[in-house]
Image: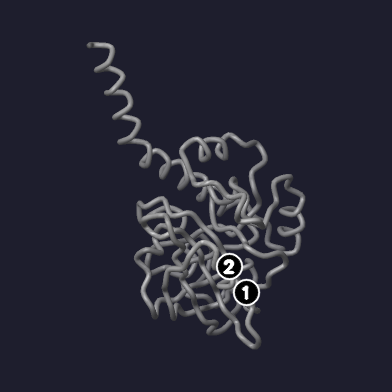
Amino acid sequence: MTTIAIVFLIVGAVLIFNRPIMGWVVNHMTDLTLKNHETNYEDNVAKAKEADDVTFDFEEVDDISLGQVLKAQMDQTKPNSIGMVSVPDVNMQLPILYGVSNRNLAIGAGTMKEDMKMGKGNYALAGHNIRNERSLFSPLTLAKVGMKAYVTDYEKVYVYEIDKIHTVEPSQVDVIYDHDNKKELTLVTCNFQGKKRQITHAKFVRAMNLDDAPKEAFHELETK
């Protein structure tokens, strides 16, 4: 009976501490990656395209797990950030990584289409919701219409305003399609139950130089 009790204790501890440990490791990788970038966007993208695991096939994305996060942590080839995305009102600031590989999505926001341009078309990013309101796209569960969202390529800052938050079936990929004469930002994550996708959609407001961006937009960067 003692052995069985110990086994149950260990299993219980793993279940209790699994998500906090995962969140801590993810946040650590996110912070390191935010600092790992060059100032030239084209160079950042060129380096990112050289990675062996580049993919834009969302069907290849696995549910995030502690094992997957630890694997990303131990990977010697750290991804290069091609930009940053921020929703200051929910304290979300993440590196943007090229493609939606499992490694990228364990660290930050992944681009869902090849060769997208910030401030043009429908700029679509995917991120995991690990249900702690602090890591990856989890804070988007607190987002509200009217909040500002920002993306930057480290030269320009593109300002958007959230105008719609809704859920869709995983098969509804049309939410990331471009629309004629529209400049949009679409942030895609799982809803709290994990069965559907939460879509946080924002309309383009304006672009500005990085030096002119408000301080709260990107607290890791030297802005006003």
Q: Name the residue nearer the viewer: 167 or 126.
A: 167
**Residue 121: quarter of image:** bottom right
Q: Is residue 161 left or right of residue 96?
A: left
Q: Is residue 4 left or right of residue 144?
A: left
Q: Which residue is mark 2?
A: 173
Q: What is the C-alpha distance between the residues marked 2 and 1?
A: 8 Å
Q: Position of residue 71 (x, y in %)?
A: 56, 36
**Residue 151: quarter of image:** bottom right
Q: Name the residue nearer the viewer: 216 or 211.
A: 216
Residue mark closest to the camera, 2 vs 1: 2
Residue at figure coordinates x 43%, y 78% from the top left: 164
Q: Is residue 25 above or below residue 198?
A: above
Amino acid carrying label 1: it is Tyr
Badge 2 vs badge 1, beta-carbon distance below 8 Å: yes
Q: Residues within 10 Å of mark 2 (few under 14, many from 20)?
A: few
Display coloring: one colour
Q: Which residue is mark 1?
A: 177
Q: Name the residue nearer the viewer: 96 or 165.
A: 165
Amino acid carrying label 2: it is Val
The residue positioned farthest toward the top in the image shown: 2
- Image quarter where the N terminus lies is top left
Q: Is residue 90 above or below residue 102?
A: below
Q: Is residue 102 left or right of residue 197?
A: right
What element does badge 1 sit on?
loop
User: How many marks do you count on the picture?
Assistant: 2
Q: Is residue 33 above or below residue 140?
A: above
Residue at figure coordinates x 65%, y 86% from the top left: 180
Residue at figure coordinates x 64%, y 48% from the top left: 79
What element does badge 2 sit on?
helix
Label of residue 116 in the image: none
Q: Residues within 10 Å of mark 1 (few under 14, many from 20)?
A: few
Q: Is residue 4 above or below residue 197?
A: above
